[in-house]
Amino acid sequence: MVNQIKFHTLNNKCIKCRKCSLSSTRKNVVFGRGNPNSKLFVIGEGPGQQEDEQGVAFVGRAGKMLDSAFLSVGIDTNKDCYISNIVKCRPPGNRKPHRNEVSECIPWLDKQIALIKPKVVVLAGSTAVESYLQVTEPISKIRGCLLYTSSSPRDRTRSRMPSSA
């Protein structure tokens, strides 16, 4: 069970963050959405326009697609998982976040993961894969790999899933 006081404290600190230039153009910090007590954590790139306006993760077109895909296999994204992003503020023009923006923001994500302690982390898209795993390989080369973590949220090892999986 997630310590709600620590989780809300983290959210409140994140909302006040001004570590990178994204804070000067945002309308809202988008901390995440869903059930922080779930065992499934989904990570996207960053907020889009609708997310920035509403302050809620994955409520735009991509969020609707994600909700639909998960619901088709019986997963309610508000009850059965927690969803957040690599960066918590919308990059101008929905551009890909710059490295310095990722490096300033990813500690928030690490702290979310440390509090939630998910069993499974799903990386939604190439920016999430590259930023979270700190790799330069294209997502097509990594697809089909299972990643195992140690006690540290950023210490990962990789193994190839069998092609029949």
Image: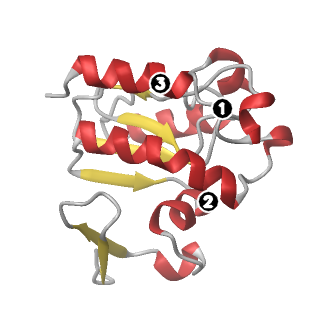
Q: Amino acid at mark 3?
A: Lys
Which mark identifies residue 18? Answer: 1
Q: Do labels 2 and 1 touch, CB within 8 Å?
A: no
Residue at x 63%, y 42% (from the top left corner): 46
Look at label 2 and name its amino acid: Thr
Cα distance between the residues tagged 1 and 3: 10 Å
**What secondary structure is marked by label 3?**
helix
**What is the x, y in percent for residue 116?**
25, 37
Q: Residue at x 57, y 27 (%)?
A: 30
The residue most toward the left is: 1
Is label 3 in contact with label 2 (beta carbons under 8 Å)? Answer: no
Q: State the image coordinates of residue 43 (x, y, percent, origin top left).
A: 47, 47
Q: Which one is in front in this view, the residue at disc 3 or the one at disc 2?
A: 3
Residue at mark 2 = 127
Query: Mark 2: which secondary structure?
Result: helix
Is 161 on the left or on the right of 58, as rendered?
A: left
Instruction: Tell me the quarter of the image containing the N terminus.
Output: top left
Q: Residues within 10 Å of mark 3 (few under 14, many from 20)?
A: few
Q: Which residue is mark 3?
A: 13
In the rendered image, residue 78, in percent from the top left (x then y), is placed at: 38, 24
- Nearer to us in this view, 162 or 19: 19
